[in-house]
Every structure is written in structure tokens, then in C-alpha cells.
Image: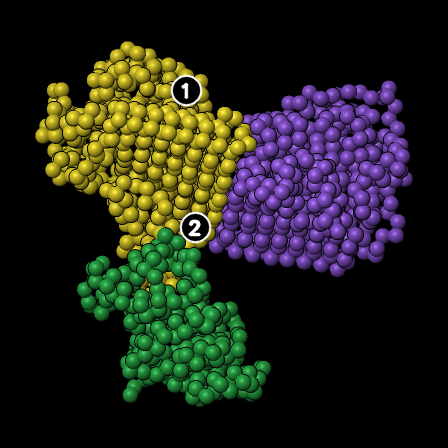
Chain colours: A purple, B green, C yellow
Amino acid sequence: MISTTDQRTMTILDLPGATPDDVAFPPWLATMRRAAATRFAELGLPARNDEEWRHTSLRSLQSTPLVPAGGTASSLDAGVVNAAALPGLTGPRLVFVDGVLSADLSSLDALPAGLTVLPLSEAAARHETLVREHFGVLADGAREAFTSLNTACLGEGTFVHVARGVDITEPILVLAIATGRAATATHPRLLLIAEESSRASVVEDYVSLGHVPHLTNIVTEIFVGANAHVQHAMAVRETDEAFNISTLKVRQERDSYFASHSALFGGALVRNQVNPVLVGTGGHSLLNGLYLPRGRQHHDSHMRVEHQAPNCESRQYYAGILQDHAHGVFSGRIVVSQIAQKTDAIQQNRNLLLSKDAQANTKPQLEIYADDVRCTHGATIGELDEEALFYLRSRCLSEEAARGLLVYAFAREGLERIELAPLRDALTNLLVEQLPYRGLLDSFVGDEAG
Amino acid sequence: MTAMLEIRNLHVSVEGQEILRGLDLTIKPGEVHSIMGPNGSGKSTLAQVLAGRDSYDITDGSVVFRGKDLLDMDPDERACEGVFLAFQYPVEIPGVKTTQFLKAAVNAIRAHHGEDELDAADLMGHFREKMKLVHIEPDLLRRSVNEGFSGGEKKRAEIFQMAVLDPALCILDETDSGLDIDALKIVADGVNSMRSPDRGFLVITHYQRLLNYIVPDFVHVLVDGRIVQSGGKELALQLEEKGYGWINAPVGAGA
Amino acid sequence: MADSTATLDAWAEQEYKWGFVTDIEADSAPPGLSEDIIRFISAKKDEPEWLLEWRLRAYRHWLTMSPPHWQFLPRGYGPIDYQSIIYYSAPKQKGDGPKSLAEVDPKLLETYEKLGIPLEEQMMLAGVAVDAVFDSVSVATTFKETLAEKGVIFCSFSEAVKEHPELVQKYLGTVVPYSDNYFATLNSAVFTDGSFVFVPKGVECPMELSTYFRINAMNTGQFERTLIVAEEGASVSYLEGCTAPMRDENQLHAAVVELIALDDAKIKYSTIQNWYPGDKDGTGGIYNFVTKRGKCIGKRSHISWTQVETGSAITWKYPSCILQGDDSIGEFYSVAMTNNRQQADTGTKMIHIGKNTRSYIVSKGISAGFAHNAYRGLVQVNRSAENARNYTQCDSLLMGDQCGAHTFPYIDVRNPTAHVEHEATTSKIGEDQIFYCTQRGITEENAVSMIVNGFCKEVLKELPMEFAVEADKLLSISLEGSVG
């Protein structure tokens, strides 16, 4: 446990120099860590004049004093952890408390054959070649400050490997809890390699327990082999003081399927970046997301789908429900390179503004260099449909119940795309807790669950 | 009477896979030929090849249409010479009105035959007469080509175009697919009204039902890219009753 | 299909038919930009002191600015040497200049006739008044008297400064301030001529107004400025056309257009832009960097932009509407066609401020050859804009596999009662469509032309009838004679 006397408060820019390297990484990784620190210093934090950050200011993050993660894991009662975890997910699990892996709270026993789940440091020692060939390849941080920062401050991470042809049905859970005991900066890292024709799913769940500012700066790299099927889900359930920046990089080989589900349910400033690259023909990519900022929260999702091979399909469906003074940002870009003929890409962003003080910015973009493609995108921003409200009220629903039901239906559409039933149900329950008029929704939700 | 269309030993493949494997067929003016066959037997390929679609490789054989080498012509030349294909899936052309489209087509064909262009008034008169044949509403002519048409409207519009362009050889590619019985009767009536001693028909269908309404002179069964049996209209009835299974595919045809 | 590729290649290799040069003696400023040059231009035009001051303020501000870099131009563009540009060039004239068309240099009349814009009134399309701008000056304006009877002012900008200074001073820079952006600021400093239109209260302008811009002289930039004011209940339809000779260097065209619509006024502004696009290797051509903006100040006012953009080496322009008056309407209809090595980054901005404001955007981009065509648009709904509505449709057509089509819409909404919808598609010209047409006897070349025109139909129908034919020709002329 970090003793309070050790704690130095500092800003985000000081973190690389101050984060302890107390995890036993091999020398090549230590070298990468140092190079990333240099790169981060060169890049600095992105400013508003950077087109990709035009609607998201990092000024408040920059002025927030932070404490580097590290040392031994904070103790946390197993009952607290289980209460915090998404219900119904019973597979292998790694639990990080304030950025430090807790062996006691994790369960990696009796893994099915062909599935490897290890702390990253252990994987780097035991499977050096494999890790070295993949780590930092997709998230090289050359141009992205937060990716560089993650590598520069690398602590313990998660390594998942699924062997060729192995079909893992239960999702692997990575639960990261910020206790709120200190203003910790953590840098979760996940490397997933799914070999040819394998199948796996992983859920990253970020929860904060206390009302203390903290930074969660996530980098996830996923390699989806030929004909493999990988689902990734991320839930951000942090409090109004939290900064959560995530970068998900995916490489898809031929005939592979990849789905990303993002549920942004809390956090003062949430930036969710998903970037699949389809390098083999016949791949399919689904990016599905829901953002529900409330109060003065700011949720920003940046999607970039790169079609680099012919005959691939991609689908982006993002929906935002904006309450109070919340600010929702969506930017999606479909990039179709010259050889990516017969690309079929769809991008949809829908926003529901529930308050006169809420704000939505959306930027669905197409960048196309191939001529035989079908790309469509669309965006809508608006309030609830008056016709539908009237219709429901004419069927005896109160105005509140009608509004609640329509909002629920709007959000539910995204969750229905999640194949993993326990995850879908858990997120649906969480969703209801976040919505206005939630008391009136129980009967509907109950019906659906039944 | 001399043949209007003579197909000899036609071999066609797509991406190295042979679809038609030595097909022979002769159509004389005034005759209605029907080609039937299971899915994937090459029926639609034949229609597309005759109309000049260039995504097929013609590896062997010849097609002579009214004494000329059909395979040597561009699609629009074939159309001007009198070959009409009623498409299985008529294509939508947004923003181009049906009248505008047909005006261009009629005048292209007239120019090909050294005739003067028709003016708008003459054309409209011509269109109105043909619209009655297939119960087409005038409103349809003002809409973009096939855009937002129902399945039945698309097929009727194809027959309407056929009547307007007055071709020598009418190829109907599964025009009956997806039509209910009322729509089918309208389409068949339109086709029957166009039967004449100097026009030939090639009716491609998967179902015998159409042939109750457009009664063919000859029925051919296409299996694996070859005509394996030919006969009169009664052959269609036998096929309906027994399916394609009873026709023994020729040795070496694979099935 | 092989043949349709040939059609498209031939289309991409079409020649520019407006590329001739008129041999006429010019009265030019020396190249370069300085306060002296600005004073020279102002003196040439005998301008009042306030206008010179305004120009100088703009120039001083411009010196503090740097060129924009956010455009999507994959091939970039060469640096512009502002000191090598000639900022003023006018065909030489004797004495005070022509009092009537009879006195206009016949060479100029001939030039416009060759461009298909005869300036003699009896030869013109009925119901269209023309202001002809040649390099830096307006050489003739037709039908002035007919318009004056209705109280409509239609004249060159220079003349407006002399004859109606109070109107110019009242409205100049109120929509596009001199400090607006790099190229608008440059224009404010050095603009030479352009058109001025004023339609008084309650008057429906009896004819189409049109300005025809022609760049002729070498090394010149064209910096015209157009100001259109429609008072309460007035309405006007205005069209501009433009061409330039074929030259190997890039010439800069940095215009500013300001539109002002008061209560219940309606302004329809159409552009057929056919500046020289450069040759097929991308040498030469016009840099068309234009700021166009309309302000719907009045309640229920209505501004509509229609553009058919086929020329220029590079086009950046975003004709915009500030929807300030309650119930005002903004519209933008655009066809942008790029081929060879042309690059276009064009679109619109709709700024909703008033209640119940509505905007409608239809953009059609066509790319061929090695061209890049980007739509960039902003729909902004401010907090005050209760019940704002926007619908955007944005379609791209690709012809060939070396070109690009890009779409960058920005949607910013701060009012929950807004309804904003954006739809976009990108597709290639369908082989199925071409085959279907040819199967009906239509040649491939005509089929492509027909499909392209069909694709653009929603925009072309917005053009005034007299010009719809011209635009149609412009789009299909490129396809003529291309199949052997």
C-alpha cells in the first residue's frame, strides 16, 4: 500500500518521470517505456486547435493534481468488489485496485484449454516473443499523447491469448476499481491475441467508488486472427470527478468478426476512441456505443474505421442521451483505401437532447478512395418525438411514463446488439438507473427480462 | 423460314467457372420458346450474354441474329438491331424520368435505322397507346426509371418498354418471379398482344405457371449449361408434375 | 466494364473550351501588395476616404494572419506568392469610359459573345440583365434603365460606391467583416469591382440578374466583391458565371459575396463556376478561394444558394446562411464535379439563431480521374433557436478508382427542440445502370451523361430556367464525343 507520506501531487505532464517501475518488466519493455516518456514530452497534451479535440478541452485535466499509481494493491473487501462488479459475469477475472493487480480478488483458476490469461509482466517473461511481436504494434503512440503516456507509465496489465480454433464462451472480465482514497492516475493496458478461427470475448469495466478526481488512461490492443470472432465491451461507470480516456486499437485479418460495445455511463470527462483496421478481405466490424452524460459530464466518442482490404463490412451505431448540462460529442470516420473495393460501411449517430442546457456535437465523416463501395452515414439530433408521446398518452400512459419509455426504447436499441446475454442484462439494469423517470420503467424492463 | 436467332455450341464462363457448356438453340420469327431449368443451370446467364453483358467470357461458339454476328456487337447496337431483354431485376436510375429515358431509347433506335427523331407529342401518343396494354398509370412515366416501383410495377414497366421499343426478339428473364396471379395475367396479356409472325420470344422461367398464360411453341430444359431436353408445351407440364429430377443429366455433366 | 471505363477516361480528358485569351491593352498596377498598391486601387476608383480606410484596416489585419490549413486537399497546393500577383488590371479605355454599350470596346463585346454572353440587349435572353466583369473592372451592365423604373439598383460595385455611397457604407462588411478569414480579409483590402444589387421594399425584381466574370490578364488575381440587399418583402434572383483563359500558372480568385435579406425578403443566388481547372496533369488553373455568406436578418426571410461547380484547380467555398430572423429559411444546393487533378473542399454553413428557422442542404459530389472532392458543412443550432430544423443530404458519385470522395459534416446543437438530420451516401456509377440503358439502345456515353444528370437533378432544378440549360450542357458537354 502506498503510504500517504510517499505521495507527491503533480500534474499529468509530470507522471512519466514519477511513476514507479515496480513491475518486473524485461529490459526491452523498460526501453519502450522510456522512449514513450520522451515521445509524450514532445507531444504534450492535445489542444482545442487540434481538429480531433475541437470539442473537448483538457484544461481541467491538466490542472488536476494527480498521484501516480504503483506499489502494492490497496486492500479492498471482497464483498465491496463483488457488489461493484457487473452481475452475472462468472468467467475468469482480473481485478485492479487503483491500478495495481490484486491477486486475491482475481480468479484465473481452471481456465479452459487453449485460453491463456496472465498479468502482462508474467506474459512478457513467459511468452516473450509473442508479447514482443504484438505489444505496442497497434498502439505505437507516435502521434497520440495518451497512448504514449500509457506506455510511459506502464504498470501491470492484462494479457489474453486464445489458441487457434479454440472457442471460449464465457467473457473474460477485467475490473478496474478506483477506490477514491487518492487522486490516482492509472494506465490500464490490455493485449488480446485471438488466433485463427478462435472465439473470445472480453469485458473491461471501470468503476469508481469515491468522489475524488482520478485519471484512467486505458490502452487496449486486439489482434483478431483470420476467421476469428472477438467481442470487446467496455463499461465506464465512474463518478463526476473522473477522467477516463480510452484507446482501443484492433487489427482484423481476413473473414474475422470484431464487435466493440461501449457503455459510457459516468465520468466527468470520458473520451472513448475505437480504431479497427480491416487488413484482410471479408472482415466485419461492429462499433456499438451508448453515452449517457448527466450533470456537467462530457462524453466524447471518436471512431475511426479503416478499410484496407476489399469486401469488408463495418457498422457504427452510436447513440447519446444528453441530460442536464451534459455535452455529448461524436466523431466517426470511415476511411476506405484504394484497394478496399466492395466495402460496405454504415455509420449512424443519434442524439436525444433532454434538456435545454445540454449540447450535442456530431461529425460523421467519410474519406473514400475506392470507387466501388457502398458507404452511408447519418446523424440525427433532436428531442423525443411528439407524435409518439401523444400516441402513448392516448393509450393511458402518463406523460412521465411515456417519456421514460421512449428514452428507454431509444437507448435499448444499442444494448440489443450485444450478443452476450449476461452483459446485456447487466447493462440494461444499469441503464435504467441512469434514466429519468426510472421508477416508472420497472414494469417494462421486467417484462423484457422475463 | 430462316432462323432469326441461331446459337451454336455456346460456351460461357465467369471467373474461370463454366456456366454454359455448349448450348444450341434456334428461334424462327413468330415462335415462342421457353427455357426452364433449376436454379444455377445458366438460364439468366444466357439472357445476359445475348443482351451483351460483358462480365462473361465467351470461350466458344457463335450467335447469329438476323444474319449478323451478335457477339460482335455492343449492347446498344444489339438493342438497336432489335434485341430486347426484360430484366429479372430492373435497375433503378434516380433522377432520370421514364419518359426522358424512353425518348432517348426510341430516338436512338430510330437514328440507327435512319429514321427521323419523334417529337414529344408523337412520343406521348405512342406511349399512351402502349400503356393500356399493361395497365400502366401515366403517373409512372413521370417518375424516375424504376425508382420506388413495386415489384409488379417494375415488371409491367419492362413489358411496357418492350411494347414501346417494338423489338424483333423479346427475351423475358424470369419476368414472372415474385408476381401474384393478377399481376402475372396482366404481364402475360401484354406479351400475348405482341405476338406476331415476325417477332420471336425467348421466355426464361423457373415456374411452369407462366406458361399457362404465355403458351410456348417449344420448351427446352436447361441443366448444367446444356439443353438436355426439348419438346412442346406439354413438356412444361411434365416438369411441373415431376420436377427436374426425372430428367437425367447427360453423362459427365456432374449432377 | 471496359467500354464504360473508356467513356469515363475520355470524359476526364475533355478539353476546356473557354480557354482563349483576348488581346487587349490593359491598364495594370505593378505586381505586389502594399499600402501603396491599395491607395493606387482606391485612387483609380476615385473612392471616398472611408473606403480607403476600411481597405487599409483590412490590409493591416491581413498582415497578422496566416493561411488556413484545415482543408482536405490530399495533394496540397503550391505556396501563393502574394507579391507576384497583379492586383489591378483593367482593359484600357479612352476618356471617361463608355457611356453606353455602343462605346464599349468591340473586342470586349466579342469576348463575351464568344463565351455565349452577348451583351447587346436585343440579342440577350429575354428577362436577364447582365453585369460583365473583365479582370478588375465591370465593362458593361445591361437593362439598367428597365430595372431603375422599378427602383432596383443593379450596377458595378465601383459605380455603387460613387452613386449610392450611403447604401454601400451601411451594408459593406456587415455579413463578412473585413477580419473574417485570410482570403476575405485580403479581398477587403484589394477588391477591385463586382456587382451591387439593391431591391427596395416590396419590389419583386422583374428579371434575372446576372454577372459574368472573366479573368483575362496574366498574373492577375481577381478579387471581386458582390453585395446584394433585399429590403422588406423584396425578392431577387441572381446568377454568376465565370471563365478564364488556359494558363500554366495558378491564378488566385478570392471573392466575397454578401447577401442581406430583411423581413419577408427572398434572395436566390446561383453560381455556374467554370474557371479554368488546369490541364490533365494538374498544371495551371484557378485557385477559387471564395467567401460567400448571406444573412437572413428579417423575419420569414429566405436565402437560397445554388451552385454548379465544374472548374478551378482548387475550390474552397462554403456559401452560408446566418438565420437570424425568426422563421427564416436557408437553402444550399450544390453540384461539384471534379476530374483530372482538381481538388474541391466545398459545402455550407447554416447558423440557426432565430426561432423556427429551417435549413435544407443538398450536395452532390462527382469525382473522376485523380480528383478529390470533399463536402464540408456545418449545421449549428444556437441555444436561442427554438424549433430549428435541418435536413442534409449529401451524395457522392465516384467515376474511376484513382479519385476520392469525402464527407465532413459538423453538427453542433445547443437546443433540445432542434431536429437535425444528415444523410450521406457514396457510390460508384452503376455498371448495372449503364447496361440497362445500353440494352434499351442508348449509347454508353449518353447513358453516363443521363445518369450523371439524374444524380444531380435535385440541384439542377433549383437553377433559374434560363441557366438550367447552360448547366445541363456544361455537365454533358464533358461527355460529348468521348466514345469512339
Place residue C177 in its image quadrant. Answer: top left
Place residue A437 in its image quadrant. Answer: top right
Q: Position of residue C473 (x, y in %)?
A: 27, 48
Decide which of B118, A283 is in the foreground and name it. Answer: B118
Q: Is residue C444 above or below residue A150?
A: below
Q: Disc 1 designates what residue?
A: C179
- Circle 2 packing at 10 Å, graded few (<14), some (14-19), many (20+), is many
Disc tally is 2
Residue located at (66% from left, 50% from top): A417
User: What label does residue C301 carry, if any?
Assistant: none
Q: Is residue C137 left or right of residue B33?
A: left
Residue located at (54% from left, 53% from top): A344
Q: Are marks 1 and 2 in contact (CB under 8 Å)?
A: no
Q: Position of residue C26 (x, y in %)?
A: 20, 27
Q: Disc 2 designates what residue?
A: C398
Amino acid bearing label 1: Ser
Place residue A40 in its image quadrant. Answer: top right
**Of the image marks 1 and 2, the number of the one nearer the N terminus:** 1
Residue located at (24% from left, 28% from top): C203
Q: Is residue C41 left or right of residue C313?
A: left
User: In which chain is the residue bearing label 1?
Assistant: C
Amino acid bearing label 2: Leu
Q: Is residue B125 above or below residue B254?
A: above
Please, what secondary structure does the residue beneath circle 1 have?
loop
Q: Position of residue B131 (x, y in %)?
A: 31, 66
Q: Position of residue B125 (x, y in %)?
A: 23, 63
- Circle 1 packing at 10 Å, graded few (<14), some (14-19), many (20+), is some
Residue located at (48% from left, 28% from top): C385
Q: Is residue B201 above or below residue A264?
A: below
Separation of residues labelled 1 and 2 (CA atoms): 37 Å
